[in-house]
Amino acid sequence: MKRSRIIMIIGALLPLGLFIFPLWNITLEAPQYPIPLGMNIYINDFADANPHDIKNINIMNHYVGMKYIPDAIPEFKIFPAGILISSFIGLIIGFKLNFKWFLGWFILMITLSLAGMYDFYLWEHDYGHNLDPKAIMKFTNADGTVMGFQPPLFGTRDILNFKAHSYPRFGALFLALGMGLSFLSYFIGKKESRQRVAT
Amino acid sequence: MKNTSKIVAGLFSVAMLFTSCNNSDSSTKSNGALSSSAAEKVYVAPGEHDEFYAFISGGFSGQLAVYGLPSGRLFKVIPVFSVDAEKAYGFNEETKPMLNTSHGFIPWDDAHHPDISQTAGELDGRYVYINGNNTPRIAKIDLTTFETTEIIEIPNSAGNHSSSYVTENTEYVVAGTRFGVPVPQRDISIKEYKGNFKGALSFIKVDQEDGGMEIDFQILMPGFDYDKAHPGRGDSHGWFFFTTYNTEEAHTLLEVNASQNDKDFIAAVNWQKIAEYVKNGGGKKMPANYAHNVYDEHTHSATSTMKKEVLVVDPTEVPGAFYFLPTPKSPHGCDVDPSGEYIVGSGKLSADVTVHSFSKMIKAIEDKKFAGEAYGIPILDFEAIHAGSVKQAGLGPLHTEFDGKGYGYTTFFISSEVVKWKLGTWEVIDRKPTYYSVGHLMIPGGNSRKPFGKYALAMNKITKDRYLPTGPEVTQSAQLYDITGEKMELLLDFPTIGEPHYAAGIPADMIKGKSKKLYKLEDNKHPYAALSDADTKVVRDGNTVHIYMTMIRSHFSPDNIEGVKVGDKVYFHVTNLEQDYDVPHGVSIIGANTSELLIMPGQTETFAWEPKQVGVWPFYCTDFCSALHQEMQGYVRVSPKSSNIELSWSLGEDDEDEDEE
Ligand SMILES: [Cu+2]
């Protein structure tokens, strides 16, 4: 089998790592939490970084009127299906189709990932801004608007007494690596086809 | 090129010069007069942890205090034999059975000698055992929760003082009696003491899985006073040594009458032999009545069971298992060095510390070097077993521990000092005063095969002017000595709770990682637990009302209860739903004739309230738990006895949408 196909097939398989490793992590640090509170986001679950962290994040957040982090969201069904289907498509492409399709799969994955990120952003925004009007503590920004508590999409941000970190985890690495390999396989495939023409 | 290398070489030698300078500098520093600063040695910076735990008994406080060394900071007072209103120990329904005895509920005892469980003669940090002296009991403290989880009463015993020492693999916890008493107890003239009263030595078998206790056998020794004890180790493993006084068997004015014999005894008991004898059907069962109280971490509740029988052994029926080692002047401490060869008897009315040799003892037994017998038990010839004495070391030796480097450290009560001496040569190396009247001392692991010989902690009975005065009653104290050098150095002096009789120390790293952070809600098997808001309810059963309540930052559920009547007995069963480290909540209500509850995350506790007056009575959280702690409160409406208001309960319901008659 040609090198480009092998790389494409590996690339198509790597996103399956998302079923084992978390995609993202949000960690909240504060002085009275010497072991920070953390939540690992899997494609099908929100999980405690340490036992009971989500429960304790909820208890903290209810003071400012944030909703409880739900046990399940529709995305937990959509994302795994999306990953399975796109890996399957990637495999078909890797085995059967011409290298130009490799680029096609790469573009598909970029699009899906961006859509996923946007969806995550929307949820985060709602989580951080759609506050209970009967919140125990209400905070306003300097300009008088109601303060939101949206964690950053990527990076670190101070939210009241907490420092919130939001960074990709192993699962995201698998996804990125898979996409990178498909992109690479496109160029290798292109080179291989040119070589064949030349000979 | 050549120039550069010359410069480099030059720089290098200059650097060498500096380093060697530095070296000589630091070496003079470590030997210099300013080398040690006591303050520096005991300073543990904010947020840092101490190197050792010290479990210091509270004596007549009935409790066990947990300190850090070298800082001397107090972390926790564990209630053991005494009720503790702060923690609801002995007040809440769950822990009342812990203090049950054959004499009924007893809210107090005198807690003396903590000892940490051992494996292969070394501290294993699983449990602390401690004796209750007055109404004889032994307690077990679990070192994952730092709570008392078991108490067993000792029958046929009185003044449970030569207790509670563990054998090399924690096969047994041993409890000896200080008072001779009639066995079984009966109506008999006190004057008939001699020959009729017995001194029971109890061997409590320890469950290797959970540290649980069960009396395997009791040896009915002659009615001397068994004062202190220690197990053998190494070659002497399998033996136990008890000091005795009042071998005169006096029953009145003991201060004179029990001090007449020039020598009392150390009783050497081969417990392995007796365990074997008992296993083969030896000994006889006698009726008894004693309580065995066990706390279950999952039901968060204790149960008390009355035991009705105990196996007793007559020492004359197990030849070769009992010997008396003559030891001068009412010995108190009975301590075995880390090798197991030396048995140190501290004759408390003497100036010398007497040391017996285990190997000589075995030889003397083989050669039948006896000096007589008492009640059928051979008395060994003093000269044949005597290893040596620390001569004129001080006045009133009490107790010895070891540093594992070949030295013993003995406290002297009368001359108020700690004396360091060398095993084998018996020479005094150093002496340091204590302030004042030291009782026992403790070196972490200092009564095991593997001492951690860095610090010695002396526990003083009297402090007089040492601290700011607090009226007629002033604190007792502990004093920390650095024992790493040839000479001891007093580092720190800190107050203790109650009377510190003895302590057990252990490197913090051996246990701190195992310390529980919370109780898991899913493991909570309390029969009245409400594990979520959905489980909360109020149930009436005649005049008894059970409230299944939850607490979480920052509310109770339910927090409004109506339908309770005067004359009801109301049980608040409160579950702390938190699953976060260090978030306890407390609760109490006006007029409750009991203590608050202090409930750890995941735990359920119960207090009873018998409202005597009509009204609306508030309850609230008693532990500052959160920013909204002051809002964590509720009301119970109490109606007249004749009222027919039905029970109702709620949380967060808005006003006046319910009607009532
Ligand atoms: Cu509270």
Image (cartoon, coloured by chain):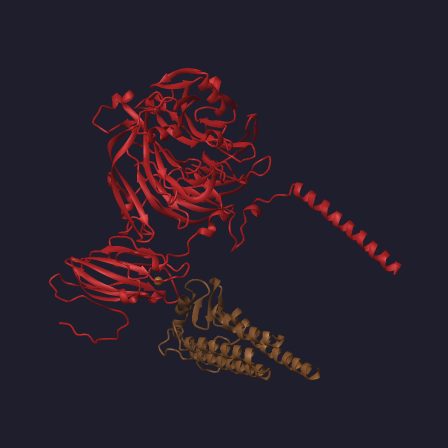
Can residue B472 be seen here? Answer: no
For ligand 1, the image quadrant comes to bottom left
Q: Is residue B442 left or right of residue B488?
A: left
In the displayed orientation, state which residue is furthest to the left. Answer: B642
Which chain is in red here?
A: B
Measuring 29% from the left and 45% from the top, which residue is drawn there?
Answer: B98
Q: Is residue B201 left or right of residue A105?
A: left
In the picture shown, does residue B157 fall above or below B641?
Answer: above
Please tell me which residue lies in front, B396 or B103: B103
Residue B564, percent across and down? 18, 62
Residue B5, percent across and down? 85, 57
Please tell me which residue lies in front, B570 or B499: B570
Please tell me which residue lies in front, B385 or B186: B385
Measuring 36% from the left and 30% from the top, which residue is drawn there?
Answer: B276
In the picture shown, does residue B250 fall above or below B499?
Answer: above
Residue B386, percent across and down? 49, 21
Please tell me which residue lies in front, B54 or A89: A89
Residue B444, percent across and down? 49, 40
Considering the image in quadrants, where does the N terminus of chain B appear?
Answer: bottom right
Chain A colour is brown
